[in-house]
Amino acid sequence: SAYSAVVSNRTWPLAPVAPVIHSAVVMGTNRIDVEWSEVANVTTYTLYNNTSNDTNTATAVTWTVAGTTNYSDTSLSTNTLYFYWVKAYNVTGGSAYSAVVSNRTWPLAPVAPVIHSAIAMGTNRIDVEWSEVANVTTYTLFNNTSNDTNTATAVAWSLAGTTNYSDTSLISNTLYFYWVKAYNVTGGSAYSAVVSNRTWPLAPVAPVIHSAIAMGTNRIDVEWSEVANVT
């Protein structure tokens, strides 16, 4: 006879090889963006995460079709280390897990520090000390001659662990207001409560003796001028 009409089919491909995670970039306090390589003969990808480096207890967080090789994981806890793996699948089965990649979500912005003291040490110097707070990278100290943060000037920046500053460029006999803010990668705290103090006045000028009047055999009455900033 003649040949029958043709019929064809294709055998299944091998299971895909494991993808490679290129990056797991922290984007906020609850978000890590993961990107991985495209592999051949893939139908879907599954992305897994865990807070420990253990695929046995990892959770599948998303499924994507071939051609989609990235995901924004946005349901995370703050300041937490996450481990990621991805597997590729087709009709034959799944690949091995990719090599692990990890990153830590950002901490919350720090709380406001507390200024413990602002001690006048001279005519142009006030020493300020404040509390250490958690999850801080840097502190900024502000001052003003009025009780107004809107017009305050940043006078010092310090790293975590350094919680004091000698402000030495001040005007004598002037009231200064101080605030401090704490910062990390997420942002800044509120301003601390205000603390203020006044620099010392300059030493007084010499008085002028107006008179020294003899009033008797054993008495002289002396009178002199009043001067400013005298104790």
Image (cartoon, rainbow, N blue to C red):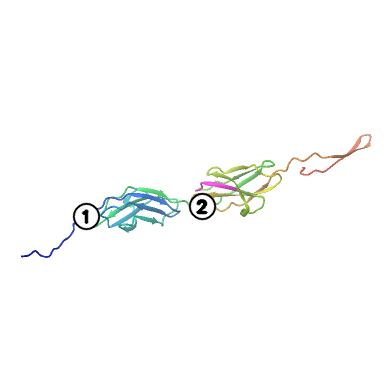
Q: Is residue 214 left or right of residue 157?
A: right
The residue closer to the viewer here, 40 or 123, is: 40
The residue located at (32%, 58%) in the rendering is: 64
Please provide the residue range marked out in magenta: 135-141
Q: Which residue is labeled 2 in the image?
A: 187
Label placed on residue 102: none
Q: Which residue is mark 1?
A: 13
Amino acid type indicated by mark 1: Pro
The quadrant of the picture occupied by the N terminus is bottom left
In front: mark 1 or mark 2? 1
Q: Earlier in the sequence, mark 1 or mark 2?
A: 1
Quadrant position of the C terminus in the picture: top right
Instruction: Tell me whether circle 1 and circle 2 mark residues in contact (CB < 8 Å).
Output: no
Residue at the far right in the pictured view: 216
Q: CA distance from mark 1 to mark 2?
A: 50 Å
Report the side of 139 relative to 196 (left or right): left
User: Where residue 165 appears, x then y in whole percent?
Assistant: 60, 43
Q: Residues within 10 Å of mark 1 (few under 14, many from 20)?
A: few
Question: What's the residue at 52%, 49% (across, down)?
Answer: 183
Say whether residue 140 is magenta: yes
Residue extending farthest to the front is 2
Task: Assess disc 2: are there few (<14), some (14-19) or many (≥20) residues with their C-alpha within 10 Å of its C-alpha.
Answer: few
**Image location of residue 82, percent across then percent down:** 39, 50
Element under disc 2: loop
